[in-house]
Amino acid sequence: MVLWGLIGLCAGIEFLLVLSDQGVIGPDRLRRLALDYGGFWPGLLGDWRANYPAQPWLMFVTYGFLHGGPAHLAVNMITLWSLGRGVLARVGARGFALLYLAALLGGAAGFALLAPGLRPMVGASGALFGLIGGLLAWAYVDRFTHDEGLWPIGRAVLLLIALNLVLWWAMGGQLAWETHLGGFVTGWIAALLIDPRPVADG
């Protein structure tokens, strides 16, 4: 249910924003308001004035439930469904929730530390890369413990780097790779704290 709940929440928010974009519901600038109040704005960590007192802290979480449009949402939710089932099978709902939250926070921290400008950031991809990092961390432990080759892990990491480079180029440098990196590293570490044991052989 935690997986369906996340997907339903993100989809519900985007559905309302699309209705506002089409003029079906008000206010007219609901997407802009959602971005202003829920997006991750690096300037709020500096001298920018927040819209409400807790915004500089809450934005480390709220950004992950907003998306740039239906296509952005669809790609992320399909990815969440694919990755989430593997994490749930390994550590259950509680472990999944801990890993997802840690990666969400880590993705925002990566963007805050590495992004060169002050542009806002939204999307669940930081948490999704954290799920990938967690799954690869567990795979590394399992393969190392059972004396299996580690090349599949290295190959997966190289493919992720290549994917980010291609997307960064295709999107004209607008890809938040900093969020992906922060989420991945945090997810890797968090996964080993949540469940450091290898799976039993056979």
Image (cartoon, rainbow, N blue to C red):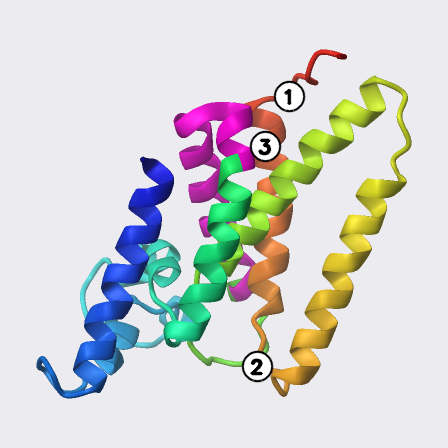
Residue plotted at (34% across, 37% down):
2
Q: Quadrant of the C terminus?
A: top right
Sooner in the amino-acid sequence: mark 3 or mark 1:
3
Q: Which residues are magenta?
A: 86-111
- Image position of 183 with respect to 99: above or below: below
Asked which secondary structure carries label 2, the reply is loop
Q: Which residue lies under the disc numbered 1?
A: 196
Q: Which residue lies under the disc numbered 2?
A: 174
The answer to whether the residue labelled 3 contacts the one labelled 1, judged by CB atoms less than 8 Å apart, is no
Q: Position of residue 55 (x, y in %)?
A: 26, 62
Residue plotted at (64% across, 57% down):
181
Give the Cα distance between marks 3 and 1. Answer: 7 Å
Closer to us: 12 or 194: 12
Residue plotted at (62% across, 50% down):
184
Tell me which corner region of the image, top left, top right, bottom left or bottom right, holds residue 120: bottom left
Q: Position of residue 154 (x, y in %)?
A: 84, 46
Sooner in the amino-acid sequence: mark 2 or mark 3:
2
Q: Amino acid at mark 3?
A: Ala
Asked which secondary structure carries label 3, the reply is helix
Closer to us: 118 or 134: 134
Q: Is any atom of residue 114 visible in this view?
A: no
The answer to whether the residue labelled 2 contacts the one labelled 3, judged by CB atoms less than 8 Å apart, is no
Q: Which residue lies under the disc numbered 3?
A: 191
Residue 143 within the magenta-colored segment of the rendering: no
- How dense is the environment of label 3, judged by Cα within 10 Å: few (below 14), some, or many (20 and up)? many
Q: Amino acid at mark 1?
A: Pro
Sooner in the amino-acid sequence: mark 1 or mark 2:
2
Residue plotted at (39% across, 59% down):
64
Q: Amino acid at mark 2?
A: Gln
